[in-house]
Image (cartoon, rainbow, N blue to C red):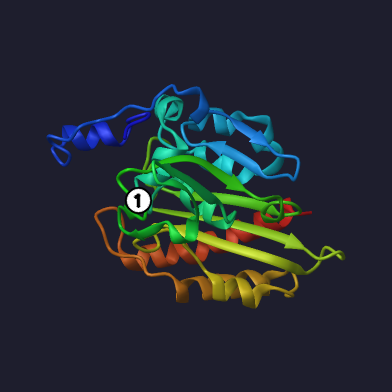
């Protein structure tokens, strides 16, 4: 299945998908657009382009971190044609939308002739470039519930060798919700891309951070906890050791900014 084609056509050209048949779902109105339900749930249709998401009023008002993340994908041409559904279904850990969607506890709506499945994004990835989506299934929409964004401040940081047109060497998404006194953490979420074979959440670090005071000790704790939970690899882009350094540094920067954004 092909929509924007910014990933699939490259794989065809390189020979990895030589001989495959393509079915285009590009331009189908029912697969495009963003809406917010009465209960606050934000729905993003799978064929919505990155540019549309980054600039949409609902996204900027409810989940601005996701808008910031997809605004760092490739260059303007890629963001105009690439879709969030393709970015997720491609199954790669470097997808800029993936870690943000993990932090937001997004649910994926899959359709086939057999019916409809609602799959939490944490259960969607099974390995590098692999997902639970069956060959006869189409990702139709992504849903983010109000409880997963309301009251949170968020921040997505991407490290790459260049400032633009770059695949992430590491991506980090942080979300923080503060207590009423605005000095302690009520909830914290920390997600990474390229810190393992799939996007991941540092759940043990998140649990330990709840109730902590929002000071430098929190940042040091989160950074150390994250390093213990990730499993990056060495590649031509960066060594494992350098990625671990990025995990630590981006955790501190992202949590600090998310805390400021939370008030």
Depth check, front residue: 9 or 118: 118
Mark 1 neighbour density, 10 Å: few (under 14) some (14–19) many (20 or more): many
Residue 230, quarter of picture: bottom left
Q: Secondary structure at mark 1?
A: loop
- Residue 112, given in percent of the width and then of the height, sits at 40, 42
Residue 198, quarter of picture: bottom left
- Residue 154, given in percent of the width and then of the height, sits at 65, 52
Q: Is residue 181 above or below residue 59?
A: below
Depth check, front residue: 65 or 131: 131
- Residue ID at (58%, 46%): 143
Residue 219, quarter of picture: bottom right
Q: Is residue 53 above or below residue 213?
A: above
Q: Is 111 positioned to the left or the right of 55 in the image?
A: left
Depth check, front residue: 6 or 245: 6
Q: Quadrant of the C terminus?
A: bottom right
Q: Which residue is mark 1?
A: 92
Q: Is 95 positioned to the left or the right of 178 in the image?
A: left
Q: Is residue 204 above or below residue 81?
A: below
Inspect this view and state whether residue 220 appears. Answer: no
């Amino acid at each position: 299945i092909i929509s924007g084609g910014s990933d699939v056509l490259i794989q065809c050209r390189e020979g990895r998908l030589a001989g495959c048949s393509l079915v285009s779902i590009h331009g189908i109105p029912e697969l495009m657009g963003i809406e917010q339900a009465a209960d606050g749930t934000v729905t993003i249709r799978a064929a919505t382009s990155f540019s549309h998401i980054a600039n949409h009023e609902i996204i900027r008002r409810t989940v601005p971190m996701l808008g910031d993340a997809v605004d760092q994908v490739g260059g303007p041409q890629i963001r105009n044609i690439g879709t969030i559904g393709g970015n997720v279904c491609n199954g790669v850990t470097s997808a800029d939308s993936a870690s943000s969607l993990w932090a937001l506890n997004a649910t994926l709506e899959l359709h086939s002739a057999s019916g409809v499945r609602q799959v939490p994004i944490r259960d969607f990835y099974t390995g590098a470039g692999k997902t639970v989506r069956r060959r006869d299934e189409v990702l139709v929409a992504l849903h983010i519930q109000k409880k997963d964004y309301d009251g949170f401040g968020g921040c997505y940081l991407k490290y790459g060798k260049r400032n633009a047109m770059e695949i992430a060497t590491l991506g980090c998404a942080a979300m923080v919700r503060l207590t009423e006194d605005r000095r302690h953490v009520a909830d914290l979420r920390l997600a990474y891309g390229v810190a393992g074979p799939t996007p991941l959440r540092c759940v043990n670090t998140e649990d330990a951070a709840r109730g902590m005071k929002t000071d430098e000790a929190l940042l040091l704790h989160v950074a150390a906890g994250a390093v213990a939970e990730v499993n990056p690899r060495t590649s031509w882009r960066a060594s494992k050791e350098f990625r671990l350094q990025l995990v630590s540094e981006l955790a501190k920067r992202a949590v600090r900014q998310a805390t400021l954004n939370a008030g």
